[in-house]
Amino acid sequence: MKPAKTNMDITWKIKSFNELSVEELYQILHLRTAVFIVEQNCPYQDVDGKDSESFHLMGIDETGGLAAYARILPAGAAFSEVSIGRVLTSKKERKTGLGKELMENAIQFISSHFGAVPVRIGAQYYLMKFYSGFGFKISGEEYLEDDIRHIEMVLETEESRSV
């Protein structure tokens, strides 16, 4: 995926774990902690051993700061399908459309890198409508993860159904 500028002055980068600089890894872990642990008041083990086998999609703002992030995991890392996780935008970038752009970039990368495959997510329950806007459909029962309601959802294309 080529870095691309957007109308929000965001540059998109995607890197494997080994391609990340120390500064990029620090920004990723800092923002994930700020959003998932501090904002959501949810102590849990964010560094779960899956980062090293994942791709890291980063939306970098004009100051060089991390504004949006998602982790793309190959099939077998979290689910039997390719998956997207740790989806977030920084607090100041929320309600700007950046989250939508983040997901579009993640789905595009999966299509170009992995082909026409189904994509599974473990979505926070309150974001079901957001993810359904990309074509994700509920594929399981509601469950609690770290005391937060979640639901599994799958995105399938016509091509992935025939694979």
Image (cartoon, rainbow, N blue to C red):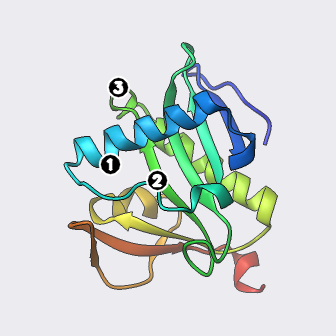
Q: Earlier in the sequence, mark 1 or mark 2?
A: 1
In three-dimensional space, the C-alpha distance between marks 3 and 1, rounded to whole angstroms, equals 15 Å
Gap between marks 2 and 3 measured at Cα: 18 Å
- Disc 2 is placed on an element classified as strand
Q: Would you say 69 lies left or right of 111 here?
A: left
Front-most of residues 51 and 7:
51
Mark 3 nearby-residue class (10 Å; few <14, some 14–19, many ≥20): few
- Residue 92 bears which disc, if any? 3
- Residue at numbered disc 2: 86
Residue at image position (61%, 72%) is: 77
Q: Amino acid at mark 2?
A: Arg
Residue 11, given in percent of the width and then of the height, sits at 65, 26
32 vs 4, left or right, is left
Q: Please tell me whether mark 2 or mark 3 is closer to you in this view.
A: 2
| Precedes in sequence: disc 3 or disc 1 | 1
Q: Up-down: is 104 above or below 140? A: above
In this rendering, would 78 be left or right of 96? Answer: right
Q: What residue appears at the point 31 percent right and 70 percent down from the top-left corner?
A: 150
| Disc 3 secondary structure class | helix
Placement of 35 over or under 79, stated as above or below: above
Amino acid type of disc 1? Answer: Phe
Cβ–Cβ under 8 Å for marks 1 and 2: yes
Is residue 49 visible to us here?
Answer: yes
The residue that mark 1 highlights is 36
- Relative vertical location of residue 52 with respect to residue 81 in this rendering, above or below: above
Residue at 75% across, 61% down: 111
